[in-house]
Amino acid sequence: MDDLRNKYLAAIADAADEAALEELRVKAVGKKGEVSLKMRELGKMSPEERQTAGPALNALKDEINSALAGKKAALSDAALDARLRTEWLDVTLAGRPRRQGTIHPISQATEEVTAIFADLGFSVAEGPQVDSDWYNFDALNIPGHHPARAEMDTFYMARVEGDNRPPHVLRTHTSPVQIRSMEAHGAPIRIIAPGRVYRADYDQTHTPMFNQVEGLAVDTDISMANLKWCLEEFVKAFFEVDGVELRFRASHFPFTEPSAEVDIRCSWEGGTLKVGEGDDWLEILGSGMVHPKVLQAGGIDPAVYQGFAFGVGIDRIAMLKYGIPDLRAFFDSDLRWLRHYGFSSLDVPTLHGGLSR
Ligand code: DAH
């Protein structure tokens, strides 16, 4: 009996898994197990022998059963431990930075322009993208026959049946916001108006929808000198360069007199554009002194007030600043492009904190 005990207790202690344990249980205490067979022999014994062997065999059976149960519990504890070790998770670790959306370079450039002009005392004005023929053209001194109308490749809205007024248009520039702002606030006034504009044109530098920012300052002693200073301050701040040279070229717009187009000194060495140095000039905006008829259309007396105005292509200056070669990419919604050229939503452009870190 001692041999049996030693043999099974040792084997149970060494069992590697539950299958091995089950095999041992069958061999020892199963129906035809060694211990069970010994118990059957009790019938052939004398009553005296049975009195000692019977309880001893029962005790042995109990001992083996409890060793089996103990080992089974130990094995399942070990299995659980192993699983806990592999599925261990340190919840105190810092989160993994998962990059989500980014700020589109046009939104970024718009925020930058807004921050710069806010610092110069301009507030932001807005107007509708579908506007009347009057706001988009007539009020800006572009009458029906004027060639500028044809040059703007205008998208017209469908004409309302029975209505013989000219149809509304998708605004071809942000200049109508000048009129709306003068009507709403009178003079003096200082506003910029960023927003979408539309023209039927499509190539590497033109898309049917693009963005402009209009500027307007009206007061009793405004001159071309104020315009020049403001634009120089703006360009220096926007391109984040100190020595920037602008060239004012006489031009013509129906809504300004005199008018000037503004070029910025740049170089194209090695195919990359550098602003502020070199022998090339790049046109970036149109500007001038607001035409008296335009002031009048906005309800302001041109005998008392003068103003300057300008219009900049936001996409254009964003392309220049961030080295984006094709305008059309702005509107392709290509995720790889957006991740490459996008800005962190937490870096809000400010003049003191840096516009485009
Ligand atoms: N509206 C013009 C355009 O779309 C840009 C412009 C030129 C705006 C001169 C102005 C200005 O305010 O004075 O091309």
Image (cartoon, rainbow, N blue to C red):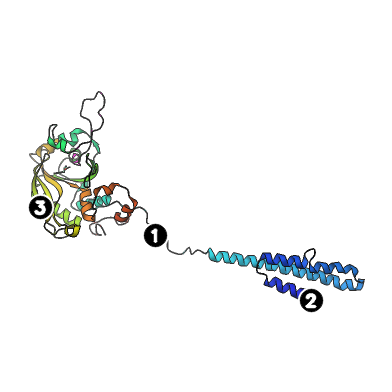
Vertical order, 149 against 2 (above or below): above
Which label sits in the foreground, 3 or 2? 2
Give the residue number, with chain letter if any, for mark 3. 247
Q: Residues within 10 Å of mark 2 (few under 14, many from 20)?
A: few
Residue 323 in sight here:
yes
x, y percentage for residue 21? 70, 67
Residue 102 in sight here: no
Secondary structure at badge 2 equals: helix
Spatial separation of the CA atoms under disc 1 and disc 2: 65 Å
Task: Give the class, few, some or many, for how many residues have Cα within 10 Å of label 1's Cα (few <14, many ≥20).
Answer: few
Instruction: Measure the alpha-carbon separation of dots 1 and 3.
Output: 46 Å
Q: Earlier in the sequence, mark 3 or mark 2?
A: 2
Label 2 sits on what residue type? Answer: Asp
Q: Amino acid at mark 3?
A: Arg
Left or right: 342 as drawn, with respect to 216: right
Q: Is residue 3 above or below residue 160?
A: below
Please give the range of residues in magenta. 153-177
Report, in whole angstroms, how far the alpha carbon at label 3 lies from the one at label 2. Answer: 111 Å
Q: Quadrant of residue 244?
A: bottom left
Mark 1, secondary structure of its residue: loop
Which of the image's four quarters has the C terminus? bottom left
The quarter of the picture showing ligand 1: top left
* Residue at image point 85% right, 72% down: 53
The quadrant of the picture occupied by the N terminus is bottom right
Q: Is residue 75 magenta?
A: no
Rendered image: mark on residue 97: 1
What's the amino acid at mark 1? Pro
Residue wearing tag 2:
2
Q: Earlier in the sequence, mark 1 or mark 2?
A: 2
